[in-house]
Image (cartoon, rainbow, N blue to C red):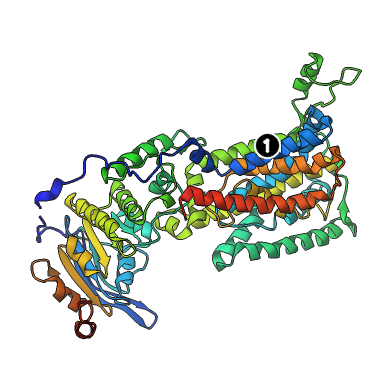
Amino acid sequence: MSDADAVPATPAPPDERLKQTTLMTRLLRRPELGALAGLVLVTAFFMAVANPAMFTLAGIMNFMAPAAQLGILAIGAALLMVGGEFDLSVGSMVAFAGLAFGTVLVTWDMPLVVAIVATLVFAGGIGAMNGQIVLRTGLPSFIVTLAFLFILRGLTLVGLKWATDGATQLRGVKEAAGDSPILELFSGEAFEGLFAMLAANGWIDTFRNGTPKVTGMPVEILWFAGIALVATWVLLRTKFGNWIFAAGGDANAARNSGVPVRRVKTILFMATAMCAALVAILTVLDAGSTDARRGFQKEFEAIIAAVIGGCLLTGGYGSAIGAFLGAIIFGMVLIGLTYTNIDQDWYLVFLGGMLLLAVLFNNFIRKRATGER
Amino acid sequence: MTDPNSTPLIEVRDLVKHFGSVIALGGVSMKVHPGEVLCLLGDNGAGKSTLIKTLSGVHAPTSGSFHVEGRPVSFQSPRAALDAGIATVYQDLAMIPLMSITRNFFMGREPLKGFAPFRHMDMAHADTVTREEMRRIGIDVRDPQQAVGTLSGGERQCVAIARAVYFGAKVLILDEPTSALGVAQTSMVLKYINQVRTKGLGVIFITHNVRHAFAVGNRFTVLNRGKTLGTHTKDEIDIDALQNLMAGGKELQDLGAELGGTV
């Protein structure tokens, strides 16, 4: 063929119908924009309305602790949602993992290390089972994990009675944990030296005798931040992250391009369950006991935080930082209301309202991002 | 151009595929040489989809021989076919609209850098390659991080083809790449198919639009009810004969007369 090299070597002229991408468009393309805007709004609201004590160091630690517990769940839920699946069983999983943790530690009298590893492995196994049922049957994960929401909650009740001879609360965790060297990683506060140093220099508030009002940062906040960073890096910068987006965006197209969709989704189910197990370990060690109501309805709050963070219910779009911000919004409102004269029960109204707003906003953003009309 | 005596990139003989009691392919033979476009024509249900799925490793054939560059092969998965240089671009399953062009382009074959456990995608390199490859096919991408959903249907097909070419495909199987496109976008895709052919790739172009086939095809194989109705080179057959062959002739002519024009 004579026209063999008739390759357009020069770039096509820019399409005059397309505007240059503005900073605004690029910002709107970030899934976590909504959560960031929400956080700014909520902060502004409480700054105006709440007792100023809320935004002292002690107040911030106060709302960050519940935010961290929810946030660890929400980040797991967010990755799974980006991967195109739901897990409604994470709340029950917290209770069930708490039971497993308590049983190994207290009833079987194993060392703390063994109990922690066993709990994480056990939760990962249940997550993998969830995933396998969803992937092999092709049923919606919504239904499969809804079943496990009840199964795990029921098993926790039954198991607690078995482990404690009839009670629904298993005590004695603190005594059993003893002074294991790894206890510091999962319980209490971190950076105590730093806080003491800051206090000595007068940079943070102290009581009259010189001890700081906040003696350290609760470890769950560190876990929360650490998991958010790792999850964000994995999602945005690694091959596995690309596979998560692909599996959730269109499993068939991903498979045709050589992405091992099943493996990706199974790992995500496992990671989500292990996040729940971590929350169980942190909170059970903190409280010194475990009970059947642990993690009650947390699955919904986790999913709502993920949605506020920009995750689409249809998968393939979302962010871990968004879920991080979403969880902070939750903690702020839950605790912040106690710093105001507003009735606590407005919290639930807020929960629903925020979800509705977030979904509407996400829908709008998605249309902007894809140029869909 | 094509040397008919060269080793074909793909050659299948008497390919048979049964699904239970249904005979989807009842003995199909065809071959593709480097630097040629083989058009697979056929009406709905003729077995086009089954044939390409067998060629691309989705289905294993029930019987028949399948050679790639002279060597007998039997693919266990689409990945195996891909590794042998057979890339398939599906009409609607090629791209993920919510993902960026770069992420789509490198989906499943992400460029990595760094050491485990900190190995990560080389995004800067990926963006550069994507922008360069897009420029080469005449699509001006200002921002390779923009979602694929913002591209037109024709551009998406071209991105999918460019991706296959970039990753070293020797044979491209294009499943009805033009069927959902408007006129301008169709010509954009056809132009690009021709460009790919001149690079020495073999192209299997599946379509039921004879005009599109005739625009870029070198040879034409017509499928009907799971069998080939013969293969014709471009100088042997004209567009009307091809159309008749494909539609089973008679009825369409009758319909044409009835409606007072060509169908």
Relative to A248, A180 lies left or right: right
Q: Nearer the viewer, residue A132 or A359?
A: A359
Q: Which image quarter holds the N terminus of chain B?
A: bottom left
Q: Residue A22, percent across and down? A: 46, 37
Relative image position of residue A18 (x, y in whole percent): 38, 44
Density class for disc 1 (Cα within 10 Å; few <14, some 14-19, many ≥20) is: few
Above or below B174: residue B231: below
Residue underneath mark 1: A40
Q: Residue at x 55, y 51 (%)?
A: A364
Q: Is residue A289 left or right of residue A298?
A: right
Query: Which amino acid, by three-letter code, is at mark 1?
Result: Val
Quadrant where the C terminus of chain B sits is bottom left
Q: Residue at x 65, y 47 (%)?
A: A308
Picture coordinates of residue A42, whole percent (x, y): 72, 39
Is residue A56 positioned above or below B5 on the image? above
Tell me what residue is drawn at x 37 percent, y 39 percent.
Answer: B142
Q: Is residue A258 above or below residue A222?
A: below
